[in-house]
Image (cartoon, rainbow, N blue to C red):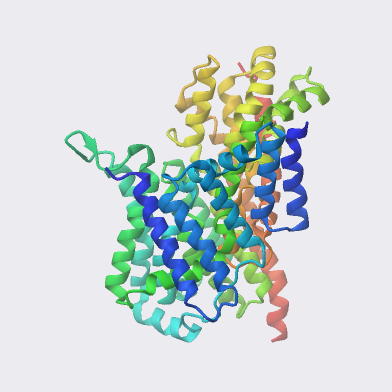
Amino acid sequence: MITLEHIYWLSGLMMAGVAIVNARDATNPRRLNNTAFWGIYAVTFLAGSYLPDIANGFLVIAMVLVASIRGLGQGRKESATREEREASAKRWGNRLFIPALTIPLVTVLGTFIFKKISFNGFPLVDLKQVTVISLAIATLIALGVGMAMLRPPLLAPIKEARRLLDAVGWAAVLPQMLAALGALFAIAGVGNVVTGIAERWIPLDNPFVVVTTYAIGMAIFTMVMGNAFAAFPVMTAGIGLPLIVQRFGGDPTIMAAIGMLSGFCGTLMTPMAANFNIVPTALLELPDENAVIKVQIPTALILLAANVLLMNFLVFRH
Amino acid sequence: MLTLVGIVIVVIGFVLRINPLLVVTIAGLATGIAGGLSPLAVVAAFGKAFITSRYVAIVWLVLPVIGLLEHAGLKERARAVVAGLRAATTSRVLLVYFTIRQITAALGLTSLGGHAQMVRPLIAPMAEGAAENQYGELPERTRHKIRAHAAAVDNIALFFGEDIFIAIGSILLIRGFLEQNGIRVEPTQLAIWAIPTAICAFVIHCTRLLLLDRSLRAELSRKADDA
């Protein structure tokens, strides 16, 4: 059976390749930092499941120190000039889209097909992780298609991966770090402290105030945690169920559905949701790392107001 | 109250623009210690949480093939395709992507998008290409603005589409949590009540996208007149 662990090995090999390409690139003044950073990251993929927690913890800290002391650099050589790329685009035309669109299409197909395939009762892939595994398999197939079509040198994919990954830099690891921070917040009970404060300071005897506090609280708490999934249980246990449902007789289904979506409004406004908001600025080479958040804030605020009104209007409707 | 020290560190760190990896690590260690763990136990908890969250980094596996295609001129081709469509404007390109992304997400096809797979190689170059078509070479600032909008479209359409699909993570979480508290809810009901917000999101963001063309025109036509 193909499990997440196999996909981690693949990721580890890619990161190791990126580290080796960096080590051999004299045009990058910080190449040793880059090599160490991606090299340690590779170890967390390849060996992370077998090392003790404390060793993994020190590996992570080592990565952070490498990235923040003197920082990471980038090689200076462009892989192709604009003219070269334009000539190649003319030559290949729309065929270039085939491998690119293979990734989403095979991922989606995989999520359906893998559920149906099994050998002697054992599924081919771990069904709990079917989407992520499908994505990884889809990238391999797309890479095969691309290699067969373009016939580049054998090491070209890893060199190109290095170019893009170094453009993203440390932001590539930030979503994972924030997930780890969320876990520590949960261990330390940060959520209960926050709802405690809300309960003490906000007059919670009026249904409109309660519903509004719940929706806005979901958004704010999501901004703090970077994730609506972390905010939902805390806010719903603290305010939603005891007040909206039990005291004022609101509908739990409507409250939960719109409450979660109010949290998503918060996701649009916080750098803590790094994979949605910070990583794309790195990927799109934007100089302002808050550029995507700034574009999203107006929509998020108007939509949050709409959610407050919708919930007030719908949740007590019987 | 001391347990909130991590939040304070994160806010200060982001405001002062200190390397976020360092800020998050310090915030995590401080929160764990404030929560009563020993320093070594905190490091271990941090390492464990980092390792169990590795799945969020799987998306980087797309980089070899995307890089290869970019090297072969994928972005240039995406621009050229849009340049061939006379009706294409930045707003319309993004509106079409928004609609497709929201509808497919509502059908559970959340993996039909993404920043690394779709936005960087295809959607952002198309949106830029449409503006280049109308106004010629774009200033850097405008390019960056269009790209940020392309990323925002992917996020907003995904967030407010996926909750209409009954088997998505957030609906399963809601259902599981309410069940622990003795309340049974139907996933289909949760999905139905996500629809009003989804419609609001579509109307609000598409209105803003239509206004984007206007603001680009105001920004760029003066330049075009000078030339």
Give the camera-side residue of B175 and B48: B48
Position in image of residue A178 (x %, y %) = 60, 46
Position of the C terminus of chain B, as image quadrant, is: bottom right
Q: Is residue A129 above or below residue A169?
A: above
Q: Is residue A233 above or below residue B124?
A: above
Give the camera-side residue of B194 and B18: B18
Q: Residue at x 54, y 35 (%)?
A: B195
Position in image of residue B27 (x %, y %) = 69, 45
Left or right placement of residue B4 versus residue A118 in this view = right
Examine the rendering and report whether any part of residue B127 can be seen.
no
Left or right placement of residue A205 versus residue A271 in this view = right
Examine the rendering and report whether any part of residue A119 can be seen.
yes
Q: Is residue A286 above or below residue B14?
A: below
Left or right placement of residue A135 versus residue A308 in this view = left
Q: Residue at x 52, y 18 (%)?
A: B180
Q: Quadrant of residue A220?
A: top right
Position in image of residue A210 (x %, y %) = 74, 23
Give the camera-side residue of A117 and B10: B10
Q: Is residue A286 above or below residue B194?
A: below
Q: Quadrant of residue A245?
A: top right
Q: Which residue is the extreme one toward the left?
A: A120
- Total marks drawn? 0
Q: Quadrant of residue A224?
A: top right
Position in image of residue B150 (x %, y %) = 57, 60
Position of the N terminus of chain B, as image quadrant, is: top right
Left or right placement of residue A98 versus residue B108 in this view = left
